[in-house]
Image: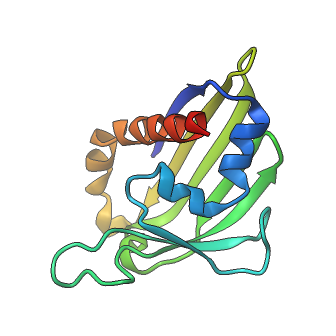
Amino acid sequence: MRLAAEMTVRRPLDVVWAFLASDPASLTKWDRGVRAVRVTSETASGIGMTFDTLGFPRGRKGGEESGRMSYRVAEFVPRHHMTVALASAGGNARYFRRATWRMQVEAAGGEATRVVCVADFAFRRRYFFLGPVLYALRGAIRRDLGYLKVAVEAG
């Protein structure tokens, strides 16, 4: 399953790229599902960097590690795109056989930058029924890009 969205940000490409690629903790400023980010590798950025995202606790069982998912930067082309691959199999990651997110930036004329987010998912066989649910929530990517736009433009 592939979900995609795009948004134009009224800031130069270098500013948008720096926001997206220099520190994974910036996810907390625009991805509503991410409460915290922990870098888990010595690689500061680029291919091979690993990090965990933590979600918001839900119910009594939700604790500090609630919604933890681990990722690895699989592709990194400065000022163009970065692909992050799911690297864990527990917690919420158990639903996916494979999952990647690609963030791409392109000059959009003047001081504007077009940001394209493409999420590619393959569900584990027993969770295939989640496909329609995730598809129904596809607008969430666009909403998160709206938060990205606000965060970057606020500077």
Q: Position of residue 5 (x, y in %)?
A: 50, 33
**What color scheme is it?**
rainbow
Q: Position of residue 96 (x, y in %)?
A: 44, 65
- The one nearer the camera, 136 or 12, is 12
Residue 112, image quadrant? top right
Extreme residue in the top direction:
109
* Residue plotted at (70% across, 35% down): 105
* Residue plotted at (30% across, 68% down): 126
Extreme residue in the front direction:
155
- Residue 77 placement, left or right of 121: right
- The one nearer the camera, 13 or 141, is 13
Q: Quadrant of the C terminus?
A: top right
8 versus 131 height, above or below: above
- Residue 21 placement, left or right of 2: right
Residue 84, image quadrant? bottom right
Q: Position of residue 120 (x, y in %)?
A: 52, 49
* Residue plotted at (77% across, 81% down): 42
* Residue plotted at (74% across, 29% down): 12
50 versus 2 height, above or below: below
Q: Position of residue 71 (x, y in %)?
A: 59, 69
